[in-house]
Image (cartoon, coloured by chain):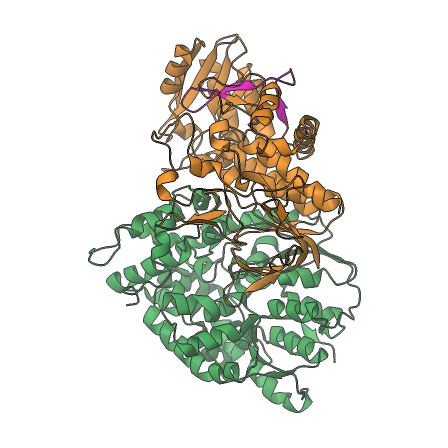
Chain colours: A orange, B green
Amino acid sequence: MLDLVVIGAGLSGLMAAYTAAQSGLTVRVINKGLGSMHWGAGTVDVLGYAPDAPEKPVQHPFTALANLVVQYPDHPYGLLSSDEIRAGLASFVALTEEIGLPYRGSAESDQNLFLPSPAGAARPVYLAPEAQSAGDLSRSEPMLIVGFKGMRDFFPDLIVQNLAKQGHQARSAFLPLSLVTDRIDANTVHLAEALDDLERRTRLGHELKKLVKIGERIGLPAILGMNDHSVVIADLERLSGVPVFEIPTLPPSVPGIRLYKALRSRLLELGVRIEAGMEVVSAEMTARHNGTPGSIQSVISATSARPYKHRAHNYLLATGGILGGGFNSDHTGHVWETIFDLPLTVPQDRSMWFASGFLSPTGHPIFHGGVVVNDVFQPVDGGKLIFSNLWVAGNILANADPILERSLEGSAIVTGIAAGKAIANL
Amino acid sequence: MHTESWQSVGPSLDECIKCNICTSYCPVASVTDLFPGPKYAGPQSQRFRENGQPHSPDHSVDYCSGCRVCNEVCPTGVKIAEINARARAHMAAEEGIPLRNRLLGRNELLGKVGSIAPPLANFGLHNQLSRVLADKVFGIAQDSKLPRWPKGGTFGKWVKKTQDQRLKSDKKVVYYHGCGTMYYEPFIGQATVAVLEHNGYEVIVPPQNCCGLPLLSNGEFDEAEKYHDNNVNKLVGYARDGFDIIGTTPSCTLTLKEEAPELLDKHDADSTDLKMAVWDIFEWIRERWEEGDFRTDFRPINMILPYHAPCQYRAHRVGKPALEILQLIPELDVRESCARCCGSAGTYGYKKEKHLIAMAVGKELFDFVAVQGPGVTMTASDTETCRWQIELGTGLPSRHPIEIVAAAYGLYNLESRQLTN
């Protein structure tokens, strides 16, 4: 029997699996499909906006975090000490070095980076893939934002205009998409795979050299190689003679997919398989009774015929929130956790789900709700342990709005690691 | 046509959130823009294929290989591959089916005809001139790897010939061998029988038909339904009597379990009873092993073995049970492929206009085998067309995992593909 089955292959599930496997536990990850990392920007946001001051981005995330947990002691970050959060993020950075996809933060440890978004806004980010770090808006070199005529969803002029409004020096330029691909139609992944080709990236490097002025840095859509990413960036910087950085695109997110694939390889080396396409539909469990917590005997996924029972000593739920599929809802407004029917703090009345404005600065109550856990990330009901062998991490946790706070990946990483450690320390 | 009732396939398309993850993982879209990707050909075009719409809006769906990687990675559970299969059937009904596709859909018939006189059939099919003609006239890719009819005759003939030597036991299983084992690779069946008998099981080999998958893939749903009905009639009695029906080709077992019932709307009690009795052999062995009812008296096999779980195996959503069992063999260093698809995808790689695409898709897998080093002498995979494709792409022989297990028991020679006794 396995020591741990992780349900969900987002950042929290994979970090929990990694932490537990590193401690010698036998682990399997099962997931319904791929998600989260494939949609995000590939960066790690720890705290971009404080809930009580949503109009201004956070400059110093750990200072803001200290305030946040005083104000909101139930926040998932409040379950960990500041040192534990820092240590969790540091071990993520070490892991990214190890898998050849290094992440970088600001030179100061309590400082957010500000990186250009695909709309030219300044995004507060705590850690970024090395390839995005030269986009740091605190740097002084003017930016040349280069797009490709015919590439969908990447508009250098829009980016430049918005950067200029914020006082950043930037200009735009276009190259033909045929430099990158001969396809009539290509998404970001196809383009990134095309640039793995030495000849194509060499041609692109020569063209960039012609466009760029001395002292500038070049921003390109995040398509700079898939499997040979670090070599592609190095080649483009060498050929153009200036720093080159990626700006994340609309999904699919190449930086996110690179991270997912690199983590998958590392996990496989540790003997952890990610089994995709397995939707958990039910569980065998006993309920809490007479003061004794219940327990999970197996989780059951759908197959082409009979149910498949995954048996383990422990289970970790990392299925995400509404978008990840951790919750479901019906037309009456009922919202439930899809596997164990854990109690949720989500309003069970449809009219209470949303604030009045779409971009409401207070966020929407439905995104704030989730599963309540104790200080070792086990779900509780009125303070009482529900199952002796179930842990929860990531975006499914209650009392945070990771979209509003821009805390999605940071929270996923540190809660995933903490839950993985708690299980390994049993 | 089976497009009136959609059961679970149709409504699933409303779950599509247009995230493009399927397009990013589609092995075909990654090597050619003749196929724009599952999202476009599937859920997006499907809006225009609803009843009452005169024509399919997108012929590129013909370039979908049916590997089901899209289903595997979809975060919201859209049955994209099945939407595409239905769209192909719709197109076939409207526009007719080329003779080549009709031929490729009928491997049982081809197998039977060739088995009448194997040497003649092999010569007829495998000489240079025939392959050129087949390529030019029918569009069957000249460089694709077609199977040979074995000298010793069919698996059925072997079962009959050796019936006195077969184990009788209270523990019985039914073997669904499929056409590949029956007509081209009887040694897979022999290895299977040897492994099952070694574990004390009597193996029943009942009359059976092609599962119908090649017909489903080529859009001949009505013909596929006949095969499926025949199988249900021939096998449902065993299912009702509580026998497990185990198969060694994951695409065949997938068809009996899920593809035929879903695509053909066969949700009657007979089809469902059969579905629930069918197992892939390693899915079944893993269950026995977990119950402590599977022998692991393996001899060491000292080699590096790159193993590829076929896309159609992964579509069972049972994990990689063959890998788990192979890992029990001492000294066997099994290397797991994360490649999406070998490219062959059943009959896809045999089509002239798709053969190069299939080889380009397979490159990910061939490269994976190559980096395992020069010490690799063979690979393993569960489906016959995958093995043939991997052999074509790597130049190395490929074996079914059940052959490896039979060899580890000392019952089978992996070189000659013969039982040792």
In the rendered image, the quadrant that contains the C terminus of chain B is bottom right
> Residue A110 in magenta?
yes
Furthest toward the bottom, the residue is B164
Which percent across, then down, holds residue B45?
30, 49
- Residue at 55 percent across and 48 percent down: it is B363
* In this picture, residue B265 sits left or right of residue B124: left
Observer-nearest residue: A287 or B120?
A287
Q: Relative to B236, does residue A310 appear above or below in the rendering?
A: above
Q: How many marks?
A: 0
Which percent across, then down, holds residue B100?
37, 65
Q: Is residue A212 visible?
A: no
> Residue B47 in magenta?
no
Which percent across, then down, holds residue A95?
68, 34
In the rendered image, the quadrant that contains the N terminus of chain B is bottom left
Which percent across, then down, holds residue A20?
71, 44
* In this picture, residue A117 sits left or right of residue A244: left
Q: Relative to A211, does residue A353 appear above or below in the rendering?
A: below
- Residue at 75 percent across and 68 percent down: it is B408
Q: Is residue A183 visible?
A: yes
Q: Relative to B122, does residue B395 appear above or below in the rendering?
A: above
**Magenta segment, which residues?**
A103-123
* In this picture, residue B416 sits left or right of residue A405: right
- Residue at 42 percent across and 14 percent down: it is A163
Location of residue A267 (image quadrant): top right
Observer-nearest residue: B189 or A422?
A422
* In this picture, residue A192 sits left or right of residue A107: left
Q: Relative to B406, does residue B234 appear above or below in the rendering?
A: below
Observer-nearest residue: B81 or A73?
A73
Observer-nearest residue: A199 or A10?
A10
